[in-house]
Each structure stands twice: as C-alpha cells, then as structure tokens.
Image (spheres, rainbow, N blue to C red):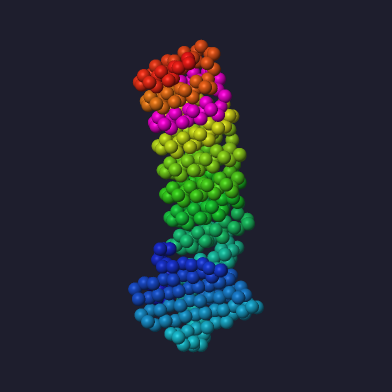
C-alpha cells in the first residue's frame, strides 16, 4: 500500500501507534510491505509540504520502509542548536542523501502528513492564517482517518480568533467527519471546559454528544463536562435530554447523579430529572436517583407530586417500599402529604413489603389526625396476610 508514500484509508490500517516520552511511533504491515515512522519534537514543513523545514532541538524524524526484503530509511536529526542532519540508508548501508534521499522524502512525506497527524499544529496555523476556517475544514475533509482528524480539529479549536458561529460550524463538521465514538469523545472532553460557557455553543456541543452510539463514551463526555464545564442554566434541559439518549440505565443513573450534585442546577431542572428517571427501566437505578432527590427538602417540597408519581412507577415492591420509607424518614411531611402517600402504598402487592412500609409510616405520621388515621386503616385492609395485617393495626 505504501508504494513510495504513506497513505492510510482509515485509522484501523495502522497496526501500532505508540507514544512514549514525547516520541510517537507508527508501524504498518501489508502484503510483504512494512513501514515505520517515529518522531520526537515539534516538526514544521516547507510550504509545499514535501520537505522538513525544522525540528525543535534534540528532536528527530525517522521513516523506514521494507518491501519484499528491500529496505530504505531516512533519518533527520536535530542538534542542540536546531541544525538538521539528514541521513539516507539503503539496506544497512548509508548512502548520500542527495539526490535519492531527498527525492524519496518528497514522494512519501505528503502521505505521512495526511495520515499520522505529524506537524498538524503548524499546518493548521499556516492554513488558518492563509485560508481561514474553511481552508482548514477542507483539509480535514481530505483526511480519511478519525484519529488524525481529531488531532486537526483539536488544533483548530485552539485558534484564538474563533467566534461562536465558527465553533458551532466546526462542531457540526465533527459530527459529519468523525465516526469513531472514542475519537469524538476524546475531542469533546478536551474542548468542553473552554466552550461550554457560551450559551450559543452548548446546544451544538450537546448535539455532537447525542450522535455518539457508545453509551460508555457518551457517558464519559457528559460526566467530564458536568465536573469541569460551566453549563449555562438555560441548557440543562438539553443536557438531561442528552442523558436520555443513553440506553444503559446504569450509565444514565451515573450521569443523573452528577446532574443532581451540581450546585448550579436550577430549581426547574429537577422536574426534568424526575421525568427522565420515570422513563428508566431498571427499578434499582431509578431508585438510586430518587433516593438522592428525596434527601433534598426543597426539591421534595417543590416536586412532591412528581416524586410520588415516580415512586408509583417503580414496579418492584421492595424498591417502592424502600423509596417510601426513605421519604418519610428524611422529610417532615404534612397530613395532606400522607394522604397522598397511602394510595401508593396500596399499590404494593407484597403483604410483607406493604406491612413494613405501613409500620414505618405509623412511626412518623400524625396519628392524632383522624383523616390520616382512617386512610392508614383503609390501606391496612388491603394486606392479604392476616399475620401482617395484625402487625400493622397493633396499637392503632
């Protein structure tokens, strides 16, 4: 495949990519041909991108190719003062760099640049200065390699003069070009803290997260921005909606817990969290979120009906009983609140769980309120077990 140049149709064609102590190494094998590239330091290219202009002091560029036993290698080494020393090998024998070595470098360098990300920072800055945002995007369009595209997008986002409209446009192109959820997630996590402070950018950013297929990668991005980014309060509805696109209840619950823990979460957003919690399939994960919400007096006060509805939507008698017990233990409820709780207790099928829940309520409810007391006894009569029923009405 690399007949004179390093050209990769996708990131999966590189057999090995390593980075250690500032040195990046790429290895590729195909049909009797093997190639290796390693480099260290900041590398800049000539304007025609067919030669190396400079390497930071102490850095190097090494490229070798072996085809059916015939090998060639170029080494360009930068001294302590940045002076370049060029070496050319055929087999194990060093030969004059001029003209054969330079000609080979001219042939293969464009492919190396396009498929490894080497010198990307300098290229992006140079293209951006000459052709602006669209020029860089056109160059990225030519790259058929998610890993390298991510590198270029990363440097593009670092351009200091980007406007909100520019950022939104670049994010839309991230969606268009990068198929790999891993690479997309890596990029979105890197740029999140910088750009999420803009109310105009956040919706496009969250749309990019929504397009990811992997629940794990999607969750990593949302988790990261909730911990490190300053999301505008107006965008929490879309943030929670993005969480709803995660199919895994475990991943959803993990992110919703972080949403709830965020001190900047506006009061209205708790209703959105509750609505999403109701949609979850797992009663266990659903209850993990409800327990957190039920521990917050203000949230319970402002969203009591919605929270009670969420508890009612729990199918597991054990989890439903657990949520109700937590509610009455952690919050001081009014008589009216208890009258709303009893119908939910009635929905519990298990005599044991229903009995356990009513006995918890008996220790916290206003027993001197006749209406509450009557509702308690009516609910007790729905217990199928005589033994559990007697336990519930004892002392009443």
The residue at 57%/64% (across/down) is 121
In depth, the one of 47 and 192 nearer the eye is 192
Above or below 337: residue 279: below
Q: Is residue 110 something that shows in the picture? A: no
Left or right: where 30 falls relative to 93: left
Is residue 323 on the magenta stretch? yes
- Measured as percent of width and height from the top left, residue 282 is found at 41, 37
The residue at 46%/67% (across/down) is 17
Which residue extends farthest right? 81
Q: Main secondary structure of the magenta part?
A: helix
The residue at 51%/69% (across/down) is 24
Left or right: where 253 falls relative to 55: left
Q: Quadrant of the N terminus?
A: bottom left
Q: Is residue 275 something that shows in the picture? A: yes
- Measured as percent of width and height from the top left, residue 216 is found at 45, 49
In depth, the one of 275 and 300 nearer the eye is 300
Is residue 253 on the magenta stretch? no
Query: What segment is highlighted magenta in the picture?
Result: 314-342
Above or below 326: residue 198: below
In depth, the one of 327 and 133 nearer the eye is 327
Which residue extends farthest top? 370
The residue at 60%/51% (across/down) is 194
């Amino acid at each position: 495949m690399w007949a004179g140049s390093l050209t990769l149709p996708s990131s999966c064609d590189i057999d090995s990519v390593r980075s250690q102590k500032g040195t990046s190494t790429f290895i590729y094998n195909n049909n009797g041909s093997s190639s290796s590239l390693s480099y260290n330091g900041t590398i800049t290219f000539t304007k025609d991108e067919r030669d190396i202009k400079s390497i930071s002091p102490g850095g190097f560029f090494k490229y070798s190719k072996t085809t059916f036993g015939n090998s060639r290698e170029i080494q360009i080494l930068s001294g302590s003062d940045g002076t370049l020393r060029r070496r050319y090998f055929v087999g194990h024998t060093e030969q004059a760099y001029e003209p054969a070595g330079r000609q080979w470098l001219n042939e293969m360098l464009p492919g190396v640049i396009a498929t490894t990300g080497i010198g990307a920072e300098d290229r992006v800055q140079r293209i951006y200065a000459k052709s602006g945002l669209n020029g860089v995007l056109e160059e990225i369009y030519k790259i058929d390699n998610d890993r390298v595209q991510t590198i270029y997008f990363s440097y593009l986002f670092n351009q200091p003069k980007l406007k909100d409209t520019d950022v939104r446009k670049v994010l839309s192109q991230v969606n268009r070009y990068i198929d790999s959820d891993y690479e997309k997630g890596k990029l979105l996590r890197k740029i999140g803290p910088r750009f999420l402070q803009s109310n105009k950018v956040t919706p496009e950013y969250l749309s990019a997260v929504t397009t990811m297929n992997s629940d794990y990668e999607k969750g990593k991005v949302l988790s990261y921005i909730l911990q490190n980014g300053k999301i505008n309060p107006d965008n929490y509805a879309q943030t929670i909606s993005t969480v709803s696109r995660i199919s895994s209840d475990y991943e959803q619950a993990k992110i919703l817990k972080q949403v709830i823990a965020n001190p900047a979460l506006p009061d209205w957003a708790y209703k959105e969290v509750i609505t999403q919690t109701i949609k979850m399939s797992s009663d266990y994960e659903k209850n993990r979120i409800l327990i957190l919400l039920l521990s917050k007096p203000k949230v319970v006060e402002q969203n009591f009906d919605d929270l009670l509805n969420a508890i009612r939507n729990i199918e597991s008698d054990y989890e439903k009983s657990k949520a109700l017990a937590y509610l009455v233990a952690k919050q001081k409820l009014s008589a009216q609140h208890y009258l709303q709780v009893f119908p939910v207790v009635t929905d519990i099928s298990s005599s044991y769980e229903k009995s356990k829940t009513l006995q918890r309520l008996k220790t916290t409810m206003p027993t001197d309120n006749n209406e509450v007391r009557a509702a308690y006894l009516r609910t007790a009569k729905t217990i199928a077990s005589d033994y559990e029923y007697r336990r519930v009405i004892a002392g009443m």
